[in-house]
Amino acid sequence: MVSGALVTAAAAASPARAATGRDPDVLVIGAGLSGLGAALALEEAGLRVRVLEGRDRIGGRLYTLDDVPGHPEAGGNSVAGAYGRVIAAGKRYGVELDDIGLRAFGGGPPGLYIDGALVAPDAWARHPRNPFAGELKALPPGAWADALLKRNMPVKDPGRWWDPENAQHDISVYDFLTSLGASDAAIQLGFDTNISYGTTAHDVSLLMLASVEQWQVVNRNANARFIGAFRGGNQRLPEAMARQLKGDLLRGRRVVAITIRNDGAEVHCDDGSRHRAKAVVCSLPFATLRHVAIDPLPPAAQNTAIRTIGYVPITQVHIVPKRKFWESDEQNPSMWTDGIAGTVYAQRFGSDPKEVMSLTCWARGLDARYLDLLGAAAAGRAVVAELERLRPAAKGALEVAKVRSWGTDPFAAGVWSCYRPGQVVAFANELAKPHERLFFCGEHTALGSRGMEAALESAERAAVEVQIALG
Ligand SMILES: Cc1cc2nc3c(=O)[nH]c(=O)nc-3n(C[C@H](O)[C@H](O)[C@H](O)COP(=O)(O)OP(=O)(O)OC[C@H]3O[C@@H](n4cnc5c(N)ncnc54)[C@H](O)[C@@H]3O)c2cc1C
């Protein structure tokens, strides 16, 4: 049963109280960064707002594991130089931003593990499993696709990656890489393994990667050296924002239907509650919105976007090392592997750069799907067994603290949205359009930025759209 906790947003952590009786002007669905950003902007404009959140937790895809040593981020990790809105929000709501170096182990580049064995950096270029060509042979697998794409990205103005003029480039990354002469083996190891966008190179649009590359350039130009994280964990930012809300923030309210009328809209939750307002702002990832009934249906392109846009599966296994096995085998605790342990990040939370408090193993794409099929307990055991195989010195020293699947999380269904081939032209200019009294925000609806910054960019836009609509 959903808890149905009623929590005043005036203090997200304060005791529950009932929702105010009067209908608000605006209902905001989702208490992640974008929903909270939109709600605060609307309140600042003088509107009465109620936020409905499906989980018992605030923050959505910002999720700090306070119960795991090292306080790893299960969700959004880093804030870069061009995150103007996020940095401003931290200042405004009193959450300090630290250099991310304080949280990560400072022990040099991660070890490269291929086919179950450690490969020394200077041996990789001549390694029998190295499938790359020419000077790119010297690059570690995780850097190959990025380097090739940067050199050859055909989009003339990547700042307008979403422009229909780029239609001929809205093709799969696989098709593009093969057109450059890349072999299947190179694409499999250099793109599909530990993938960030898509589940394989076949289901991600080249224009999606143009947008990612553009955002990297913008961040480098703004401040190439800065990468930060909020003190005490990134979830502290949405929590601080929630404390500023004047209206209700109702947790445990999973929205199942939205009915739009001429003069407003009604939102139905799975605890049977119904909420009415003049307008609704929906921040749900489309992978979860596709399970919400919307009446009347959005226009065809937007509705198809809601049903089909891609989301990236990532499953993390958070492990506490009971002894410093990396001191025994004298290798970096952080790793890049071609197996189900994926990429392994050594985390710390203290002042000593040598103190590793937990290891976060990120399985992505098809490896994440495989772990999800095993279920959490078996997935944890499988990753520990894999690490013990790769690092015999770790035998008996690894304790699973948490398994976190974003792909199977019903409130996220993936880590971030990802346009499939053909979807940028079909949807990029359609998916955020207001649908009568229903407005959209969320990272997936932003065109100018990505990640946390995209969430706040979209919140600003949606709040302005609502104010214009309500006069
Ligand atoms: C593993 C991971 C790593 C990341 N790394 C970075 C990074 O380094 N830098 C960066 O900038 N970004 C990163 N991101 C992305 C960033 O965290 C997100 O872009 C941002 O937090 C999204 O905010 P949002 O408000 O759009 O969505 P969300 O935070 O997902 O908010 C949506 C809210 O809606 C709620 N909800 C869903 N369904 C329902 C329903 N039916 N009824 C009611 N409520 C519902 C959810 O519980 C959630 O609270 C990462 C994300 C993940 C998962």
Image (spheres, rainbow, N blue to C red):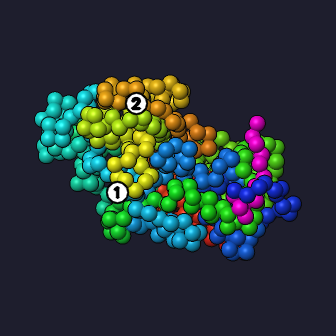
Residue visible at 62% across and 39% down in the picture: 410
If you read the primary sequence from the N terminus, does the residue marked by circle 1 or circle 2 appear first? 1
Q: What stretch is highlighted in magenta?
A: 1-12
Q: Position of residue 98 (x, y in %)?
A: 44, 63
Whether 400 is among the magenta residues is: no
Residue 295 in view, yes or no: no
- Kindly indicate the quadrant of the structure image that contains residue 118: top left
Q: Position of residue 123 (x, y in %)?
A: 14, 37
Instruction: Residue 24 in the image: state x and y as whole percent.
Output: 79, 64
The label number, if any, that marks residue 213 in the structure image? 1
Q: Residue at x 24, y 49 (%)?
A: 148
Within 8 Å of ligand 1, the CB of disc 1? no
Please say whether residue 8 is one of the residues in the magenta stretch: yes
Image-based side of 407 in relation to 169, left or right: right
Q: SS class of the residue under badge 1?
A: helix
**Residue 431, disc:** none
Which corner quadrant holds the C terminus?
bottom right
The answer to whether 423 is drawn above or below residue 370 in the figure is: below
Q: Residue lying furthest right in this view?
A: 21
Measured Cα–Cα span from mark 1 to mark 2: 39 Å
Residue 362 in the image, given as x and y percentages of width and height? 42, 39
Q: How many marks?
A: 2
Residue in view at x 45 percent, y 36 percent: 319
Q: Name the residue under label 2.
A: 397
Callout 2, which amino acid?
Ala
Between 376 and 322, which is closer to the camera in this rendering? Answer: 322
